[in-house]
Image (cartoon, rainbow, N blue to C red):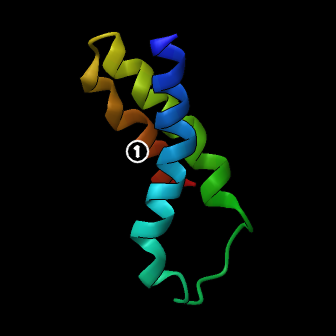
Amino acid sequence: MALVAGFIVATRAGGFEMGMLMAPWGDVGLGGLPGGGRIIGWPERGVTFVLVLTDQPQGIDFPIAAKSML
């Protein structure tokens, strides 16, 4: 249950945290995919959570690089 709770906190609550952190730059006016940050962010945080749990932190750069390409 602790792992499931941690996964939920990392993916869902992490989205709210990032939203509040990035709010000052929300009106920059860049075009893009509506809701794209949410679509990409949940899997990114989920993969990061799994990589940290499996003691593979060197793999965290992959989802970050994939997000920057999208």
Q: Circle 1 is placed at which residue position?
A: 64
Q: Position of residue 48 (x, y in %)?
A: 41, 30
Q: Position of residue 2 (x, y in %)?
A: 45, 14
Q: Position of residue 61 (x, y in %)?
A: 33, 37
Q: In this rendering, is residue 46 above or below 51? A: below
Task: Please report the residue visible at 59 percent of the width from the left and 41 percent of the height from the top.
Answer: 42
Q: Residues within 10 Å of mark 1 (few under 14, many from 20)?
A: some
Task: Give the quadrant of residue 51.
Answer: top left
Is residue 17 left or right of 43 when viewed as pictured? left
Residue at the far right in the pictured view: 34
Of the residues shown, which amino acid type is indicated by label 1? Ile
SS category of the residue bearing label 1: helix
Q: In this rendering, is residue 61 above or below 32? A: above
Task: Please report the residue visible at 51 percent of the width from the left and 30 percent of the height from the top.
Answer: 46
Tell me the quarter of the image containing the C terminus. bottom right
Q: Position of residue 62 (x, y in %)?
A: 40, 34
Residue closest to the eye, 45 or 66: 45
Is residue 55 left or right of 35 when viewed as pictured? left
Task: Please report the residue visible at 71 percent of the width from the left and 62 percent of the height from the top.
Answer: 35
Task: Please report the residue visible at 47 percent of the width from the left and 47 percent of the height from the top.
Answer: 14
Task: Give the quadrant of residue 63.
Answer: top left
